[in-house]
Amino acid sequence: MRRYVLRRLAVGVLQALGITIAVFFVIRALPADPVSRIVGMNPTPESIKQARHALGIDMSLFQQLLTFLGFHGDGVFTGSLGKSWVSGATVLSEIAITLPTTIQLIVTSFIVALAIAIPIGMATARRPGGKLDKGVFGYGLFAGAQPEFWWGLIFIFVFYFKMGIAPAPLGMLDPELTAPDAVTNFVLIDSLIAGDFTAFKSALGHLVLPVLTLSFLLVGPLLKMTQQSMSRVLSSEFILYQQASGLEKKSIGRSTLRSALAPIITLTGILFGFMLSGAVLVESVFSLNGLGQYSVAAVLNLDFPAVQGVILVISVISLFVYLGLDLLLAKIDPRILVK
Amino acid sequence: MQKRKIDPLLLIGLIIIAGSLFLAVFGNSLAPFDPQEPVGDFSMPPSADHWFGTDGSGLDVFSRVLAAPRVDVAIAVTAAIVSAVLGTGIGLYAGYFTGRFSEIVMRISDILQSFPVFILAMVLVTLTGRNVVNLIFVLAFLYTPIFVRLTRSEVLTQRTRTYVEAARATGNSEFQIATRHVLRNSLAPSLVQLSVTVGFGILLTAGLSFVGAGVRPPTPEWGIMIASGAPNIILNEWWTSIFPGIAISVTVFGYAAAGNAIERWARK
Amino acid sequence: MSLKRAISAAAIFSIIVPTGLFMSAAGSTAATSQVTFLSEDVPAGLDYDGPSAAIPASQVGMVNLMEPLVYYKKSGKSPSGVNLLKYGYAPTDFQGRLAESFTKNGLVWTFKLRKNVVGCNGEKFTADDVIYTFARAKSVSGAAPIGYFLSAVGGIKDFATFDGKVPLGDEVKKIDDYTVQITQGAENKLFLPALTIFGLGMFDKEGMEAQKTAKDPWSHDYANTVNLPSFGPYCLSKWTKGSEFVLTANANYYGGKPAVAKIVLRKVPQSANRLAAIRTGAAQLTERLTPKEFASLKGAKGVSVGSVVGNESLFLNMNFKVAPWDNVKLRQAVAYAIDYNKLIKNAYYGQAKKWKSLVPSSYPGYSVPSTQYTYDLAKAKALLKESGYVDNGSLKLTYVAEKESTLGPVVTQIKADLKALGLDIQLDPLPQTQFGDRQLTKRDLPFAVNDQEKPIGVDAGYATYLFFITGGLNNMDNYSNKIVDDTYKAIATEPDTAKRNAGLATIQEQLAKDVAWVPVVEFATQWAYSSKLSGITWHPDNCVRFFDLKI
């Protein structure tokens, strides 16, 4: 078990590093020159030279790569991701602010989506061909084909504008509330730590529509996978054996679920990785200032350090998520360790 | 003779696909107004003259919705076909002739797939320029690994079948076996995926345009239309975003339904 | 789990819980004497010699935390009630701020500094702070040398080479703890105007020096990322980059404690969301909505819109170094082909007026040239023919992609207008950073729409210096004309205002003849705010001074 984990970690780290270096070179093919933004009011040759030096782009490409990795001072290996060309702040600090918002959004959406998909998927698997089965099937097909940013807009229009029951799409908190002191940068956790329940409720309230939009989308494929997986297991021999032995429904249900979880968990991992950057559309619509919006702005602004930093961070997170899920899978189904 | 019941989903899917392809070719000419010229008062709600109203720049929404498939669907279909052909070819080779090349292909494929897709798409589009042709290349590049993986795993199963042995026994070269026999039997997953990929392509194109990294205005494209209408929903100007959204919704559903129906038929 | 259970569980979860949360989240009471100000961004940095100096959102932070030596006086209001400033060059046109009084003798200005000025950290303002500020500017040690640049614009002696090699000398001299002398190199009317600009706000020497490091002796990092030790009316209490910027009133401010105790700036990039917040009273002040959104607030309960045609304008610039735009007749054809009134009505909802010169109409030195470009399609077509240019569909109109919601209707109409003329142009949205790079550094944009340039020095001469003299710092289309250059040289050191204005009029005539830019419209700078808020004043940097406000 331990060797499996270590091996996976090593491979993953190499992969993440490989991706980052690849990205480093690819994006430098982009026609960026961040100098103009800085010298804005005063583009004399001297100030341009000074700006280029301040940004570190007057070195050769290879030197820049070494600097980025950390051989000439602060770099990836020492925990620094450089400074954003747009704001001058460290990329790490900007990611530290935006990433938690995205994670709160995605994690909550997955919890809601799984809470809906698994029970319903289980229920329909036991009555194949029934009305619910057909309904679920149709929904799965439908939801997977939707532009989620459009649905986000519709929800805003209906629930906020027409019905007035949702808070304005202004980010995580009501404008007149001050954010709780940033301890973890997760608003939900920070507000609990600070004992500030108004902020907590406000943040949760602001999450409702975005989570609704995302889970609306996620439920589709998750439901479909649950249904497929459950029906496959239900028709397997060992379940038949349990049924024949007369075990009560509840425990049969539990063991079915346990065996059916593997592909569901795998799918969750894949969707999670996709959502880390894919959530940008929902983040834009609801002004959530998350990692997705940050990465879009970074690419459009040709802010190389920020783009590199974001890709590295997302790759590393995906890595850990996949590893974590695989460990979970290994616990449920030890057979995969043998493969 | 047994009367075969036609799968209603397949029927709906095919009708929608046919409709989208039809509009991709003829939509521009069928549009009542020029989709890129301001033709009316700005921001008018749906009326007899403008069935879907006009947007913030005075463009007729109905004409733009009709003309958009020429961009959205064309990009997605072309990209899907290109990636399917490329991916199947590479997957066939990597699956049949296992060896170092196969390993390398799989590793590259893995890395590409673990990339944050949306960011990669944005970077590539920014790199190559925001026009239709580049979008096709970018999408094809992104979707090829899927087909590689699918075909390869199918081929891996197929190559152990007895008909391969038989073909070898009758003197076929490996190349002939791969292309003439194994390929034909490994196509099913790719065909199914093809339809689904078109759907993804439309969504990705629209999504990229929504954040400003897709096609350029005033090209009629559903994603751009939703994006330009989004800020005005709060001013009760719902028609600029709703209609293109419905169009995407229905179209992608059609492709997904057809793909799903084919998959169920292939499984039988 | 039974089917019924599954469904009811899902139902309870997804319907009732969110509704409960909705109810508690929607609407909450605001603290007293607080203004929540929503904007496209919050300050990204506070050092005016740093990477964020050119960003308007960051300038808001700088102007409210810092205090200038002198400033313009308030005078009059716009039709919708926005307070205005009066502009000029003479010492009587200015009020002393950190400087209690100031006199000129030849090229030497003597400033008597105000006593009892206390900053947020309890430090007192003295002549040492002034010396520090100018020495720092002269060191050219930050990412962008704005302090140096403005000192040069004001004509301070020995600020010319921009190399930071020569430390501050006698040109800014401390006479005693409350008296400073600044010497100009030559007569230059822009001395006092330059001192009003955010890039010459006074630092608190003790506060800054406490944060210096060996690598960063002028504390650029600290000023850019943490705080700005200075003497302004507000103090920074909390700063979350990309999200929030909170200011609290400086109780020791020499001008009296500010009426609004707390200002909360929040970043809300989508204008529609800012509009929603103002409408529901969740915020009390916002800016930069689209013209349509401002128009929709007419008659809204509890919300006022203040508007002023200040220095924001929209123009087309065509690059003299890129064919076919070096052809004057083609440029004129384009200028006559645009339906200006339609643009004002449809794209700006009437909140704009035709721009008649290439200098903001509110600036001293503005004059109306005899060559005016109005909508005349027949004339445009004739000029196009005379120009000899034959269109091959290769012309592109570039604009900032992020401004799609405001510029979209503008460029769509221009495209249609030019099509009627016979030119089939392609629209080319570029992200802001690329646009800025090509416009400022490379200067190779062939044909672009621009609505972001405003001369920060309130003077037509400054505008000329920036945009229209050969090799001007922001001469984005490589315009070059000897008459303009020579006339500018003559008036740059001209002490007599009448003669100077005459020279500026000559320059503006020439600019119009050459179509240096196509002046399209001057559009209104607007704010939407709670009816309980008053005191909004228009400043030339378009930033709100929170000290002006009362709620």
Image (spheres, coloured by chain):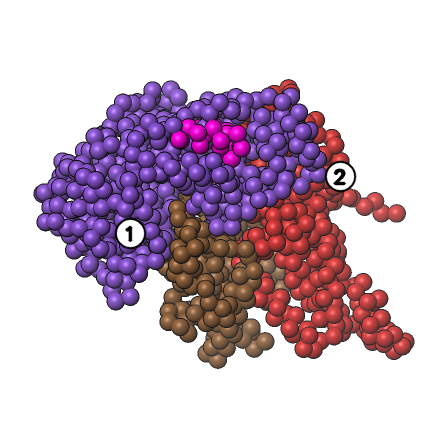
Chain colours: A brown, B red, C purple
Give how far across and how far down residue C83 sits, in percent: 28, 26
Whether residue C240 can be seen here: no
Figure check: B180 above or below B98: above
Closer to the camera in the image, B198 or C214: C214
How many marks can you see?
2
Residue C282 lies within the magenta run = no
Q: Helix, strand or loop at disc 1? A: loop
Say what amino acid the circle numbered 1 marks.
Answer: Asp
Closer to the camera in the image, C7 or A73: A73
Give how far across and how far down residue C66 sits, in percent: 23, 44
Between the residue at mark 1 and the residue at mark 2, the CA separation in whole angstroms equals 69 Å
Q: Which residue is identified by label 1?
A: C158
Q: Helix, strand or loop at disc 2? A: helix
Q: Which residue is identified by label 2?
A: B25
Residue depicted at x 79% and y 65% = B183
Residue depicted at x 60% and y 44% = C322
Give how far across and how far down residue C524 sits, in percent: 40, 28
Q: Return the chain for callout 2.
A: B
